[in-house]
Amino acid sequence: MALSADTHDGSSRTGSKRRNSKRRILTSTYIGTVIEWFDFYIYGTAAAIVFNVLFFPEVDSLIGTLAAFGTLASGFLARPIGGIIAGHFGDRIGRKKMLVLSIILMGFGTVIVGLLPTYEQIGIWAPILLVTARVIQGLAAGGEWGGGVLMAIEHFDDRRRGLWGSVGMMGVPTGVTLSTAVFALLSLLPQEDLLSWGWRLPFLASIVLVGVGLWVRLGVDESPVFERARQEQKTKPAKAPFIEIMTKDWRNVVVGVLLVIGPFAASAVFITFGASYGTQVGFSRAEVLTAQSIANVVELIAMPLFGLLSDHIGRRKIYYWGGALLGISAFTLFAAFDSGSWAVLLVAFLFTYVAHGMMYGPMGAFLAELFTTGTRYTGASLGYQVAGAIGGGFGPLIATSLLVAAGGAPNYTYVAVFMLVVCLLSAGAAWFAPEMKQRALREA
């Protein structure tokens, strides 16, 4: 009886340890993505309403906004490079080490932005340092998403990859909600206080999230799929995963980029450009940011539901319907901006963000399933980050340029058509992607 009790106690402790480990893995993935997107959107929001004044004061207001969005693009351009570097080592020596490094660098780049002197204080060096800090953020973020989502997907069973992969994606609306809520509160400050010290607070405060995320991440085990592949020698580490994937699996890289470009462009245009557009047509910054925050909470709930649904009916069906609805939402959202009614704007944001959640929920599993264990970190990161560089980095710039070409607000038609096209590209890519729900991940 004593032996049986001891065995039972040992089994209970082992089961409890395994459950705690899995919770820590999901928490690590979630917090890492929260930090990534909190950092990105506090920067994107600041670019729309603060940086054009503080770092580009010598130019016209609209041109200053373009220049500020240009610094936003610089971080996105650095992301694919960060993804290639992190993927190279993540596919060769393991996921965990690169994730620890990425979270440290993300925090460093964000805090540096919060400490920067302005153009009035140091002249041209201010925007130069701003771009430098943004590039550091971009390099770090390039390795964060791929490794974080893979750790969640590779630690759990094949039947629920859509659900567990969505946990990492849930960090996106959480990070956006935190950043927009913070700026909604800061926008209540007098303009002079916001421009002098208020805008710095969210950048400096991000160090708290980084500290929590680093502590959680240091206690996470390496991916069992990665370790098993190495132990069983099913796949030898590629000497150059980037070269291998571009020569042997480049079609899936292209599919991956197209899958992500629509929802990534939507994130950048509807939120960062949207904040700027809203103030041009008569809404206050607080009104726009509050509507975005409420819609983000709804998307946070929708994401795991769509991830779970994709485990039952497939990623492709969820994804191309999400792409179609997200493209349509470009017209409804900008029409709501022009209506002047905050209630109408809130409803339009809710529709937009639910459609966005239809794509972001299953996205992590969808991308990871395209690649083999030996190149999965590189492939998933490359698809995600190249799309981010194109859609996220240039989306606000293109939208602002199209708005100028159309004669300025409220002439949004060119912008809406642009968003419809890129969202339909992502929907179309889903037709060409393999359906891998409840099937084993590719080993080789």
Image: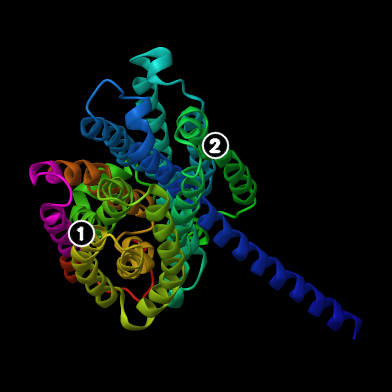
- Specify the label residue 201 is tagged with: 2
- Specify the label residue 255 is tagged with: 1
Type of colouring: rainbow
- Name the dominant secondary structure of the magenta segment: helix
Position in image of residue 375 (x %, y %): 34, 52
Picture quarter with the C terminus: bottom left
Position in image of residue 213 (x %, y %): 59, 48
- Give the residue type at disc 2: Leu
Q: Quadrant of residue 163?
A: bottom left
Q: Residues within 10 Å of mark 2 (few under 14, many from 20)?
A: some
- Give the residue type at disc 1: Val
Q: Quadrant of residue 62?
A: top left
Picture quarter with the N terminus: bottom right
Q: Is residue 64 above or below residue 281?
A: above
Position in image of residue 135 (x %, y %): 37, 31
Q: Is residue 80 above or below residue 420?
A: above
Secondary structure beneath dot 1 equals helix
Position in image of residue 387 (x %, y %): 25, 50
Q: Nearer the viewer, residue 70 or 295?
A: 295
Answer whether residue 424 is magenta in the image.
yes
Give the side of residue 10 with respect to residue 190, left or right: right
Q: Residues within 10 Å of mark 1 (few under 14, many from 20)?
A: many
Identify the residue at horizontal 60%, vertical 54% (top origin): 220
Magenta segment, which residues? 402-426
> Mark 1 or mark 2, which is nearer the start of the sequence?
2
Query: Pointers 2 and 1 in contact (CB under 8 A)?
Result: no
Secondary structure beneath dot 2 equals helix
Q: CA distance from mark 2 to mark 1?
A: 39 Å
Give the side of residue 117 with respect to residue 11, left or right: left
- Specify the label residue 180 is tagged with: none
